[in-house]
Amino acid sequence: MLPWALAAVLGAWLGHANLWLHLPAAVLLLPAGLAGLALTAPAPRKAFARGFWTGTAAFTGGLYWIVIPVHQYGGLPLYLALPCPVLLAMYLALFSGLFCLLLHRLAGLSPWLLGPAAGALWAGLEMLREWLFTGFPWLTMASAFGSWPVMLQTASLIGGAGLALLLVWSAVWLGAPGRRGVPPRLAGAALIAALLLYGQQRLDAPLPDSPQDGTALIGLAQGNFDQSIKWNKDIQAGTVDRYLSLSQGLLCGQRPDLVIWPETALPFYYQDPNDLGRLVREFARDTGMPVLTGAPAYLLDNRNDYKLYNRAYLIDGAGRTAAQAEQSYDKVHLVPFGEYMPLPDWVPMGKLVDSVGDFVPGRSPDPLRTGGIAAGVLICYEAIYADMAQERVAAGANVLAVISNDAWFGLSSSPLQHLHLSLVRCVEQGRAMVRSTNTGISAFVDAKGRIRETTPLFRPATLARDVELRHETTFFHRHFSLMRGGVAALALLAAAAALTGRARAPRS
């Protein structure tokens, strides 16, 4: 089993985004290696164990950065923080173990059926990861190809989960063990070639136009504030001054139609009357440049209880407050341990975000509008969920605005992985994305998932660029429920065949 396990682990380490050596095609070794472990296992229990421990090693290499936030900001001693990536990897490894168990029970299938069955199981398990225990769809198969947008284009038809199905299908045809003959391997290569050919054709072809389409000059500002002092009241004035200075620099050329600041760029309650909020409104009014920025917010309910929100405000060019302009968005999908504490009596660590109490989720996916821009806001973690981007485009967004704060994760692979996960959303929805973060990576991405411009990590920076404002939707967007439901149905069919059929001896 050692060669198959090594192939899977190396496939995960090299195939997913990292700071050292990223080879996207290597990710195909992950499902191929797990398939080899499953099909050569002597018993179902052995197949699960092989998949679980190999998956633990594979995912630990991609999640090593978890140590940084739980140790530096969660207050956990280093000896307790070091096992955290392994524990989270063990959770993801439960899905790889289940994949191996089910595939082992399908070992008697013809090679022509084994490939699509494996792809369906993998895609179904990735979708399950989006939902179970609030979801953790990190290190997905499609996101590994973030630096190869040619391979992402099929997601405009069938979504990231559907693309994962085809990728794993081809990997199992190419690399599954046993005397399966040349034809399945040739078919696996042909399937990869078809994905590449379609991707290149779509990249070369113009997107369908709508009469409402246009462009807008959008700027972004990256403040680069240390997470350990971000919420210190003594630096609040300096924080606002830096963002105002960075944004003022964008006015040296043509005035942007909108400037976007990161998640919680304003580390105070902007809704309260204060001099710092007034400075931001005066800047927007004096320059005529609307500002989209993040800030914490609160609501006092009729029981005199405070509810805290992670909010995005759009301050229009007249300098009106969000309340006056009715332009704000409250984050819907909150990060466990970052914005609220699950099981607080059982987990021996503090919340990573330094604020009073826990945040509560918002409700509305409506875009924030200024001029011709209808910005579908995704705050941080929300950009990795297919359904959240779908909701914003369905509500009328013609561009995706991602505001984030990846300072928690230091100089690690996490910011790059986070960016690559969000690229899949651009392709699925056919929307350009402007991503503004505190410490990087801030970026402009076009509607086909191609990164057009980025900022460096851990430096104050600004960028400005003309961005497509699109109204035409992709096939995947128009048939979202059908595509997602189809993948889920195929996965359930493959799982039912494995669970209800008699376990068959694996091929030698």
Image: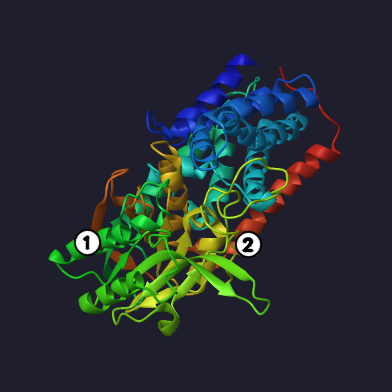
The percent coordinates of residue 383 (x first, y second) are 49, 56
Secondary structure beneath label 1: helix
Mark 1 sits on what residue? 245
Q: Can residue 208 be seen at all in this image of the molecule? A: no
Q: What secondary structure is found at the residue carrying circle 2?
A: helix
User: Residue 32's quadrant in the figure?
Assistant: top right
Viewer-nearest residue: 152 or 376: 376
For label 2, the crowd category at 10 Å Cα-Cα, with few meaning under 14, some 14 to 19 and many 20 or more, is few
Q: Residue at x 44, y 71 (%)?
A: 397
Q: Please, what is the three-letter code of the amino acid marked with disc 2?
A: Leu
Say above or below: 269 vs 408: below
Q: Nearer the viewer, residue 144 or 41?
A: 144
* Residue 292 x, y percent position in the rendering: 36, 68
Percent position (x, y) of residue 178? 66, 20
- Name the N-terminal-most of marks 1 and 2: 1
User: In the image, what residue occupies the spot 49% across and 29% down?
Assistant: 13
Judge by depth and name the residue closer to the eye, 250 or 112: 250
Counting other residues with Cα less than 10 Å from the Cα at mark 1, is it few (<14), some (14-19), or many (20 or more)? few
Which of labels 1 and 2 is toward the front?
1
Q: Is 267 placed above or below 101 here?
A: below
Q: From mark 1 to mark 2, how far is it between C-alphas?
A: 48 Å
Question: Residue type at mark 1?
Answer: Ser
Between residues 113 and 435, which one lies in front from this camera angle? 435
Look at mark 2 in the image and give the residue it sits on.
482
Image quadrant in which the N terminus is located: top right
